[in-house]
């Protein structure tokens, strides 16, 4: 009699497990696993982007995003590698003063410019990142060299500058990064500092959410299945000495695995605390979940409203670009003819 009850119990557990596995398989089957030849997503920063901008300014931003997208498309349509597409796109955005990366980098508290960048290949988990460079015209290209030409993952400050010397990348002086709008934003932030009685916590003016968050990023997958994430930034207006944001931190603002490539933009400290890029990848793998489900989980359940935007592509070419801020400069394209450029 006891053995009979035990057998019934075992069968009941097996039935429950069978149902659970069936449910898991059904959830996995909902994921589009039809591999596209290639797919590409880009962003140019997220935040409180006003819709009251003059039409000429809106058109200029959309034209810049369209041109950046074309840079990546040209590589991928010809059968090129995702890593080249990502570097080309980010180089274009770094050279455009409208975006907070490279030429358009914001001012630090001391009135200078410090740039960060990261590049990661998901198939191999190889990565290269740099932080605090002051004379490198295109930081994403130096980050790629860290990955391909060194045995390390990250170089910082003077060490990154020395590595740049050895690599022979194009250099500029600090005047190259000067931008009148960025200068005025820095002056406003300094004034807010002077008026503030609390400069130590998260409500400091240097975290003023009324200012647009800035970063540029690109994720891509190519016909061979190479999946890559890249991000570049001029940091945060009025950032303190030595501050490092989420961009060069592997697993935070930039991450790629064999499942997905992610590039974040927004409030760096919040993005780092959530280990955002890795969180998306892990959620997809262990839940399991679709890219959309994982992205929504991060932006809606982990991060708070107004903190971040995210772009991503999975190994099949499914794409994601969304934010919990008022806007994000973004665009996407794939081998099936889907193409979109958007801000709000």
Image: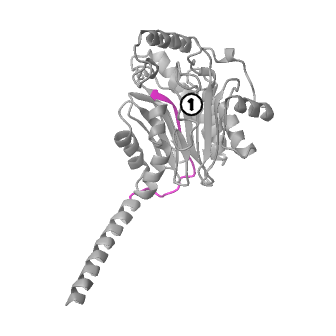
Q: Looking at this view, is 106 or 95 the one in front? A: 106
* Residue 127 can be seen, yes or no: yes
Q: Nearer the viewer, residue 78 or 10?
A: 10
Question: 201 or 141: which is nearer to us?
Answer: 201
Hey, which quadrant is residue 71 in on the image?
top right
Q: Is residue 41 magenta?
A: yes
Residue bearing the label numbered 1: 244
Instruction: Say few, some or many: other residues with alpha carbon within 10 Å of mark 1 (under 14 / 14 to 19 / 20 or more).
Output: many
The reply, left or right, for residue 199 in relation to residue 123 is left
Residue 262 coordinates in the image, percent (x, y): 51, 43
The region drawn magenta spans 30-46
Which residue lies at the image location 67% right of the left edge and 37% below the top edge?
143
Q: Secondary structure at mark 1?
A: loop
State the residue in front, 203 or 295. Answer: 203
Q: Quadrant of the C terminus?
A: top left
Image spot of residue 23 (x, y percent): 33, 65
Q: Position of residue 157 (x, y in %)?
A: 67, 29
37 shown above or below 45: below
Name the quarter where the N terminus is drawn: bottom left
**Residue 338 visible at all:** no
Q: Residue at x 69, y 26 (%)?
A: 137
């Amino acid at each position: 009699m006891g053995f009979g009850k035990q057998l019934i119990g075992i069968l009941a557990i097996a039935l429950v497990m069978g149902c659970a596995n069936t449910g898991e398989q059904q959830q996995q089957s909902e994921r589009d696993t039809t591999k596209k030849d290639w797919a590409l997503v880009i962003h140019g920063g997220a935040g409180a982007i006003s819709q009251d901008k003059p039409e000429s300014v809106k058109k200029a931003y959309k034209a810049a995003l369209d041109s950046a997208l074309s840079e990546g498309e040209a590589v991928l349509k010809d059968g090129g590698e995702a890593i080249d597409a990502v570097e080309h796109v980010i180089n274009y955005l770094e050279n455009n003063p409208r975006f907070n990366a490279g030429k358009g980098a914001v001012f630090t508290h001391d009135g200078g410019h410090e740039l960060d960048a990261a590049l990661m290949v998901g198939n191999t988990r190889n990565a290269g990142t740099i932080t605090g460079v002051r004379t490198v015209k295109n930081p994403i290209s130096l980050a790629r060299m860290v990955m391909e030409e060194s045995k390390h993952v990250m170089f910082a400050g003077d060490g990154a500058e020395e590595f740049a010397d050895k690599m022979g990348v194009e250099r500029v002086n600090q005047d190259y990064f000067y931008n009148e709008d960025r200068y005025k934003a820095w002056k406003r932030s300094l004034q807010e500092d002077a008026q503030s009685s609390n400069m130590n916590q998260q409500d400091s003016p240097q975290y003023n959410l009324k200012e647009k968050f800035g970063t540029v990023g690109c994720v891509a997958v190519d016909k061979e299945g190479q999946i890559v994430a890249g991000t570049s930034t001029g940091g945060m207006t009025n950032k303190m000495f030595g501050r490092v944001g989420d961009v060069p931190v592997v697993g935070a603002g930039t991450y790629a695995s064999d499942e997905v490539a992610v590039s974040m933009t927004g409030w760096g400290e919040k993005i780092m605390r959530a280990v955002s890029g890795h969180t998306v990848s892990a959620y997809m793998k262990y839940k399991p979940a679709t890219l959309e489900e994982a992205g929504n989980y991060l932006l809606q359940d982990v991060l708070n409203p107004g903190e971040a935007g995210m772009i991503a592509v999975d190994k099949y070419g499914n794409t994601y670009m969304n934010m919990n801020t008022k806007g994000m400069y973004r665009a996407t394209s794939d081998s099936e003819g889907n193409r979109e450029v958007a801000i709000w």
